Amino acid sequence: MACLQRTKFEDLCSEVHISIFDYLNLNEIVESFFDLNQYFKTLLCNHHLLLHCSLINEQNYVDFLLSAISLQQMKSLKCYDYHLIQFQDPNQFSCLHTLVVFKYATNIHEETVIDFILAIPQLKYCQVRMSQSRGRVTLSVPDYKTNAEQLPSSLEGLDIDSKSGLSFFYFCSHVLPRLFALRYLKVFLSCYNGIQKTIYEKPIGQLICLSKINLKIRRGSLEHLYLLAQCTPNLEDLQLDYSPAFGDPSYINAQNWFQLLSAWTNLKILKIYAEAKINIDPAQSYTIEQHFQSIPFLVERHICPLIDLTLNARTQRKVSFAVHYPNH
């Protein structure tokens, strides 16, 4: 009786190996296969092999991984601290499709991280977590050449979680104008300097693909929201957490909300939470519900708002309301 020969893993064809690698993280692949034999070392160095990678907070380990593969081979990347990639050339991530990155160091500006991300040529989705500092890192000037004309980004989904909020002026003047393909946006913005005239001098442009926004905004005015409404004509889903500048009563004026929301004629889902500390006549607050029920595009679709309005009974200074238009 003939002895059956066992088939070893390396006897499989390279196409099968590549298919299996697609289910594994780069860290697992390099540790398990890179030094196994010359065949796997050659296969892993093939620039056509795209990989999923996680970079933890150890520079030596990052250097080890990057000695085995090139940046051009990364298909998705989860980076647990931005300083691990800050000195890489973003143009070298030529096949990177998905990026999740955390930032901790206090001496790395949030704008620096965003500018780096926007320079990655084929990136489609990015999630950024700007956390409180766990320490500082040594900084020097990156050696890659930045493009002075700020080329458009290919991003379709952008999720930025910042503890203190990105500057509204920076975001609208330097980020949004480059996001022509954006479909989904989640961001926390702070409006400490009001509306700056230079924003109007350089229009954002029409973000015609943007259909869903989850926006948290602090110290804002409805004028900030008007600016966003002008460049997002096809918005279908808006979730807004809004806090105006101290003492600004405009947010309690229902007619102002009427004018703002009427600009978004394609809205299907709307959730608003607004809160501020102002002096107000309690009777005035209840006119909000009447105006929200009369917005033309909502009346046409027979959509009625669910409104929860709260007035601090002790001080009459804290006024908040939540509006939810169900998706019919």
Image (cartoon, helix red, strand yellow):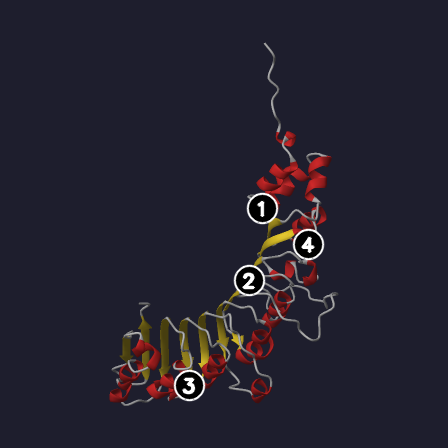
Disc 2 vs disc 3: which is toward the camera? 2
Mark 3 near mark 4, Cβ–Cβ under 8 Å? no
At label 2, the amino acid type is Cys
Mark 3 secondary-structure assignment: loop
Mark 4 secondary-structure assignment: helix
At label 3, the amino acid type is Phe
Mark 1 secondary-structure assignment: loop
Instruction: Name the residue that disc number 4 marks.
Output: 72
Mark 2 near mark 1, Cβ–Cβ under 8 Å? no
Disc 1 vs disc 4: which is toward the camera? 4
Q: Is residue 251 above or below residue 29?
A: below
**Residue 160, position in %: x, y?**
52, 67
Instruction: Name the residue that disc number 3 marks.
Output: 246
Mark 2 secondary-structure assignment: strand
First-in-chain label (2 vs 3): 2
Residue shown at 32% from the left, 72% from the top: 324
- Disc sitting over residue 126 in the figure: 2
Q: Quadrant of the C terminus?
A: bottom left
First-in-chain label (1 vs 4): 1
Q: CA distance from mark 3 to mark 1?
A: 48 Å
Q: CA distance from mark 2 to mark 4?
A: 17 Å
Q: CA distance from mark 2 to mark 3?
A: 33 Å
**Residue 112, position in %: x, y?**
63, 70
Residue shown at 72% from the left, 66% from the top: 142
In depth, the one of 61 and 33 nearer the eye is 33
Of all residues, the one furthest to the front in this rendering is: 300
Q: CA distance from mark 2 to mark 1?
A: 18 Å
Instruction: Name the residue that disc number 1 marks.
Output: 25
